[in-house]
């Protein structure tokens, strides 16, 4: 590994049987697994949504859809920055990668900030808590799990940022950044599903009122 | 090609010259002693430790079973209390599934997969050590209740809601169960991710997917089942944990929760779990039968695809555990049909095994006896399984001893017999000694008779209405003889297991020396010395046929030529790269153990300390880097070199 490998063929790793780098393959498999985690949580939410007990809060009266739309947009933009970071390191531009990484992390933090504000607002102004209704239980558990994923992603981004100052960090680390990118995009895509199934759905197909 | 050959064991980036990775604890280099075992990243040592812990828990679960059978030997028995009885059957089931059969399979994945595909280790050696220690942590958390005032978990191995709620289990036994299983799930998923990467990416040159030995194929399918099925129970457990710790309403009926959701989520995991337990055993059998029948495996591609099909359909049959919950006609019919359909690929496998035996020169060694016993006993369990698939019949058999008979036929007659076949078959490879034939065969017959005496009468007990999990029964129910026979059979089965493991221990010290290939077998693990050197293959093998080692044995000149060429290539590239040992997998797993135990005890500070330890372990692990050193077996004149 020296000057002879100045031009790296990023999608291909000659040391593995398939040419896919091990780290990337592991991460793809993990994301398949993570799909099932979120699938189970989303199913739980959707199943319970169909059977609201008397007194269950009406989702559209709780949600602040403008704010959530804004934070969704920010999260989508963070994926753009993540893609730019991967592209930068694949071309060996460490400084450019650092800038994109920081922006990605910043957008992630903005999203988390919106979520913290949203939770605060729901609990103290809309009286929706994790304990006082089944809607609260499924909503906070699902979106909280997603928020935890974003938080871990931000931690990973900032750790990679710090690590990039280590001597020897270079284009050869592209697969590390790319694997992190896979995770980040995945968390982003999951949010699109959650935003659709948990938020938008309530405006399109509201559940029949529980006044029975 | 030469590049690919040399690097087929390459597991990470080379450190650029002059850059020292950050290590807090000095990187251990001990080759023997306690530190070597605690910090090892060698898949063979990790496999042996998995096997050791699994066998210990197998014996613990067996003792629990014997107490259960002793309680039931006569009617109106009061040997143990009803609550203790509940603890026994809960922990017997949980232990046998999660702490005995699964880790024993994991042991064989570790021991065999890299050897069968011609690799020098798994793709992520430190992650592999982490899986092992996390498994140990989960096992400790699950069993901690025996030593606490709360007692062991007692809500049944499938912990139906709302039995696990605060109302019905106010003590922490349910918390130990949920947290313990959660930790074991982490271990399973992490290990499976590692094996998926290993099997897909670390195959030796020429080892195409359709040349991969059937056992390794089953390991791959099982790993996929694990990563896709485990999340379902993980989230279900999260919901129970949140209900208990944070007052959510997932299974709280008064606030709109529905306990039936637990059943669905549990069995969406629970049914693939059945195939997680049985697919690897099908793999052992597919390796053992051809060796002792002196024939190639009959219908290799069909075997592989049937395994994949079983795994796939396995995700669509979970509700056959819930026929009596009133799901409605459509759902019930759909799950009944899917359940009948899954019998087809299973039957195909059985016919292929028979096809392998047909016209073969059968050699009746101990592993072969257990393998043949597997086919017969597994079929028996399969037949009663098909009976369950008919929903009307199932509602009669549901929750009765008939079900107990059924799943013990597939889990003992099936999975355990296959494991008992696998142990003496691969024992010589890893310990260099053969298992004593005479006592091995004696143990087989005692186990075979004892097993059938225990579980065959349970079919009749179940059809005569004896419910499972019953602490005791009245003398006038007509169940006395059946229970007496079953209990006496259980003692015989226990004696057989005792003879079996005593023989194994004896053979470890006194068994006949085995060469590299005592069975004249076909797969690559037999091409290297017994026990294998730490680098497995002095020269990365080149694979030309499905039965790779068989081909090598019959093309000696060609093989020797290739070996010389590859050896030269590897030496030119700096020799064999071996991963470095590390403390951090153990540190991270210890963090998870502390966090789990404290969380189950509602101790927030301790949980955070544990999580901090886990996080510190993970960061130091990342900073330490894969590390490693190079070996030159050729130059040092290693006796391993042929």
Image (tube, rainbow, N blue to C red):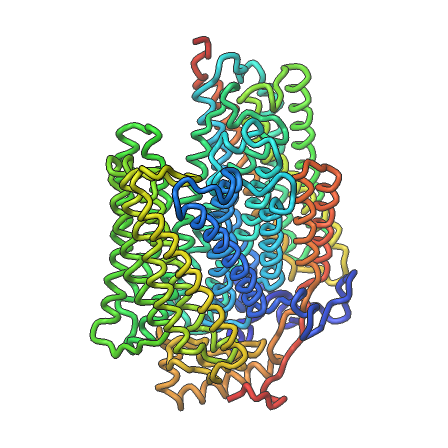
Please provide percent x and percent y for residue B394: 28, 38
Count of picture labels:
0
Which quadrant of the structure image shows residue B15? bottom right
Q: Is residue A12 left or right of residue B632?
A: left
Q: Nearer the viewer, residue B7 or B556?
A: B556
A159 displayed left or right of B186? right
Vertical placement of residue B353 versus A123, above or below: below
Q: Nearer the viewer, residue B338 or B417?
A: B417
Q: Is residue A97 visible?
A: yes
Residue A35 visible in rendering: no
Q: Picture quarter containing residue B451? A: bottom left
- In the picture as drawn, the residue positioned furthest to the left comes out as B359
Residue A165: x and y in percent read: 77, 55
Residue drawn 44% across the image and 17% down it: A207
Q: In this orientation, which residue lies closer to the viewer: B448 or B624?
A: B448
Can you name the residue that lies furthest to the top here? A211
Q: Nearer the viewer, residue B641 or B572?
A: B641
Left/right placement of residue B25 relative to residue B142 reads right
Residue B375 horizontal/vertical position (percent): 29, 62
Q: Is residue B246 left or right of residue B491?
A: right
Compared with A102, A95 (above or below) is below
Q: Position of residue A77 (x, y in %)?
A: 61, 36
- In the displayed structure, A205 sits above or below A174; it is above
The residue depicted at 43 percent of the width and 35 percent of the height is B263
């Amino acid at each position: 590994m020296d000057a002879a490998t100045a031009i790296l063929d990023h999608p291909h790793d000659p040391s593995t049987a398939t040419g896919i780098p091990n780290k990337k393959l592991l991460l793809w498999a993990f994301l398949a697994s993570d799909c099932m985690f979120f699938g189970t949580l989303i199913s739980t939410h959707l199943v319970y949504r169909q059977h609201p007990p008397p007194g269950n809060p009406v989702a559209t009266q709780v949600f602040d859809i403008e704010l959530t739309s804004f934070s969704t947009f920010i999260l989508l933009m963070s994926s753009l920055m993540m893609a730019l970071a991967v592209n930068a390191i694949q071309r060996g531009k460490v400084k450019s990668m650092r800038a994109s990484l920081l922006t990605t992390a910043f957008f992630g933090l903005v999203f988390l900030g919106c979520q913290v504000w949203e939770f605060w607002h729901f609990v103290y102004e809309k009286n929706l808590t994790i304990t006082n209704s089944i809607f609260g239980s499924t909503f906070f558990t699902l979106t909280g799990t997603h928020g935890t994923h974003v938080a871990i992603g931000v931690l990973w981004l900032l750790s990679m940022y710090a690590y990039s100052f280590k001597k020897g960090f270079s284009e050869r680390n592209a697969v590390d950044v790319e694997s992190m990118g896979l995770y980040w995009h995945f968390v982003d895509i999951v949010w699109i599903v959650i935003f659709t199934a948990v938020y938008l759905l309530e405006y399109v197909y509201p559940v029949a009122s529980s006044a029975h | 090609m030469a590049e690919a050959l040399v690097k087929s064991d390459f597991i990470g980036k080379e450190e650029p010259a002059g850059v020292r990775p950050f290590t807090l604890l000095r990187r251990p280099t001990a080759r023997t002693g306690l530190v070597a075992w605690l910090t090892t990243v060698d898949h063979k040592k990790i496999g042996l430790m998995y096997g050791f812990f699994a066998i210990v828990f197998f014996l613990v679960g067996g003792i629990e079973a014997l107490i259960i059978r002793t309680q039931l030997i006569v009617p109106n028995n009061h040997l143990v209390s009803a609550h203790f009885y509940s603890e026994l059957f809960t922990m017997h089931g949980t232990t046998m599934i999660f702490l005995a059969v699964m880790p024993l399979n994991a042991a064989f994945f570790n021991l065999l997969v890299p050897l069968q595909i011609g690799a020098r280790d798994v793709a992520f050696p430190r992650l592999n050590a982490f899986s092992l220690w996390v498994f140990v942590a989960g096992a400790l958390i699950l069993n901690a209740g025996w030593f606490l005032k709360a007692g062991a978990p007692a809500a049944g191995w499938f912990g139906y809601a709302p039995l696990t709620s605060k109302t019905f289990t106010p003590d922490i036994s349910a918390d130990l169960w949920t947290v313990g299983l959660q930790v074991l799930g982490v271990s399973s998923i992490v290990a499976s991710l590692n094996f998926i990467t290993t099997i897909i990416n670390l195959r030796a040159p020429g080892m195409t997917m359709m040349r991969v030995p059937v056992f390794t194929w089953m390991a791959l399918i099982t790993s996929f089942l694990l990563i896709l099925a485990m999340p379902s129970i993980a989230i279900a457990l999260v919901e129970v944990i949140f209900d208990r710790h944070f007052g959510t309403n997932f299974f709280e009926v008064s606030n709109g929760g529905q306990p039936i959701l637990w059943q669905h989520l549990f069995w969406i995991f629970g049914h693939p779990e059945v195939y997680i337990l049985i697919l690897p055993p099908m793999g052992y059998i597919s390796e053992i039968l051809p060796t002792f029948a002196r024939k190639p495996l009959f219908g290799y591609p069909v075997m592989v695809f049937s395994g994949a099909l079983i795994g796939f359909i396995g995700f669509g049959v979970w509700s056959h555990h819930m026929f009596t919950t009133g799901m409605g006609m459509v759902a019930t019919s759909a799950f009944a049909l899917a359940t009948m359909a899954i019998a087809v690929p299973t039957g195909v496998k059985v016919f292929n095994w028979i096809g392998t035996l047909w016209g073969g020169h059968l050699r009746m060694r101990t592993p072969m006896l257990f393998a043949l016993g597997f086919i017969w006993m597994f079929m028996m369990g399969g037949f009663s399984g098909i009976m369950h698939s008919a929903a009307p019949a199932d509602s009669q058999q549901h929750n009765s001893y008939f079900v107990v008979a059924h799943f013990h036929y597939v889990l003992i007659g099936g999975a355990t017999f296959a494991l008992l076949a696998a142990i003496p078959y691969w024992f010589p490879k890893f310990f260099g000694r053969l298992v004593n034939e005479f006592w091995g065969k004696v143990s087989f017959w005692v186990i075979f008779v004892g097993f059938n005496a225990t579980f065959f009468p349970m079919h009749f007990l179940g059809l005569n209405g004896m419910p499972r999990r019953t602490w005791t029964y009245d003398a006038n129910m007509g169940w006395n003889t059946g229970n007496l026979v079953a209990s006496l059979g259980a003692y015989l089965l226990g004696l057989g297991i005792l003879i079996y493991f005593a023989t194994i221990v004896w053979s470890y010290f006194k068994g006949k020396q085995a060469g590299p290939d005592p069975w004249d077998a076909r797969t690559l693990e037999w091409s290297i010395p017994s026990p294998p050197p730490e680098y497995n293959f002095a020269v990365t093998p080149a694979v030309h046929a499905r039965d790779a080692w068989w081909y090598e044995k019959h093309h000696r000149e060609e093989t020797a030529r290739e070996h010389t060429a590859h050896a030269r290539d590897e030496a030119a590239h700096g020799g064999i790269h071996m991963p470095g040992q590390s403390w951090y997998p153990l540190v991270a797993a210890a963090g998870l153990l502390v966090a789990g135990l404290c969380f189950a005890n509602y101790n927030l500070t301790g949980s955070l300390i544990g999580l901090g330890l886990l996080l510190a372990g993970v960061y130091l692990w990342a900073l330490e880097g894969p590390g490693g050193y190079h070996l030159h077996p050729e130059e040092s004149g290693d006796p391993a070199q042929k």
